[in-house]
Amino acid sequence: MIRQENKRKTVRMFVVLMAAVIACVLSACGCTHKNGSGDTTPSSTVTPVSTGCEVHFLALGKADAILILADGHAMLIDAGYQHNADEVVSYLKSHGVSKLDYVILTHGDKDHVGGMADVLRTFSVGQMLISPKKEKSDLYEAMVSAIKEKNISCVSPEVGTTYELGTGSFQTLAPGPKALKEGSDNDASIAIRFTYGTKSFLLMGDALSTTEKELVDSSLSIRADVLKTGHHGKSDATNKKFLKAVQPGYAVICCGESEEGDEPGEPSSKVLELLSDFHVKTLRTDETGTIVFTTDGTKLECNQNAE
């Protein structure tokens, strides 16, 4: 009996020892790793969604960063403030991104360009799209330096140009000639309409009423299921005629805490009331956290407070 019990103990000790050895080997192979904040992120074996489409609106306070995944392909629109850089890079990695087919900088404000240099230096980039209106700032110059270092193809797209992303596509709608001539720096924002199957997303950067009027008066298609409002939901964008033309079911407002010295990040009550009058379901990143829309081209689902 004593011999049998000793034998059982020896087997149990061997099993425990082998489990510990296997755990160490897996850890050394990097199957998971922790970032600086202590969060566990997936390994490099994670890949972007291989079929279907996801549109991610990152919650970065009063700053923009939008990740689009379609059929194994990825693109990024803006990269938040400079202090958001690590968060944006980690988010992309956690969703399996190693290459960005396209990167768009809508315009050069610090809450859009801030983390861009870090993104460009971290990921392989197919093509960079930037507004024709340049910005004089250290953050903008850092982005330009990264473009040169990585030898990234960079263009200021003409209105109406169409690009493919997986089986989806997007068309550049702005800035148009009137907005560039008469509008503010925000009206120089690149605006796009991304479509996947029958579903569409109108992403306005910080474009204001000058651009909105130009779009309404144009022959371009601007109807969309999801509208990312221009200029963080402020009263100088998202007017009645524009909403009537777009007819969105959802509106996303990227808003919240702003950096010191930047303008406040709260949306306008006037815009919120207008969206309500049009029966648009309004989502704010300062209230819901990161917002992710998923579509197969026919159905559209929304996940709030996503990671």
Image (cartoon, rainbow, N blue to C red):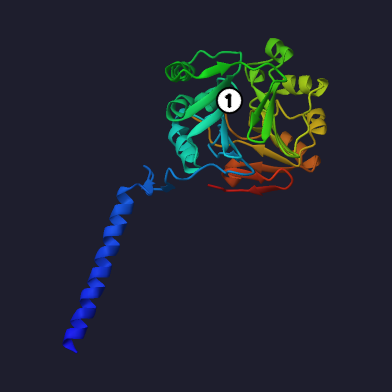
Three-letter code, disc 1: Ile
Foreground of the two, 219 or 274: 219
Q: Which residue is mark 1?
A: 104
Foreground of the two, 129 or 182: 129
- Quarter of the view holding residue 71: top right
Crowding near pointer 1: few (<14 within 10 Å), some, many (20+)? many
Looking at the image, which residue is at 61% across and 17% down? 131
Classify 121 as above or below 296. Answer: above
- Quarter of the view holding residue 212: top right
The answer to whether residue 251 is visible is yes
Side of 83 relative to 162 (left or right): left
User: In this figure, what is the number of numbered marks?
Assistant: 1
Q: Position of residue 166 (x, y in %)?
A: 63, 35
- Quarter of the view holding residue 241: top right
Q: Position of residue 74 (x, y in %)?
A: 56, 34
Give the quadrant of the N terminus: bottom left
Classify 39 as above or below 9. Answer: above
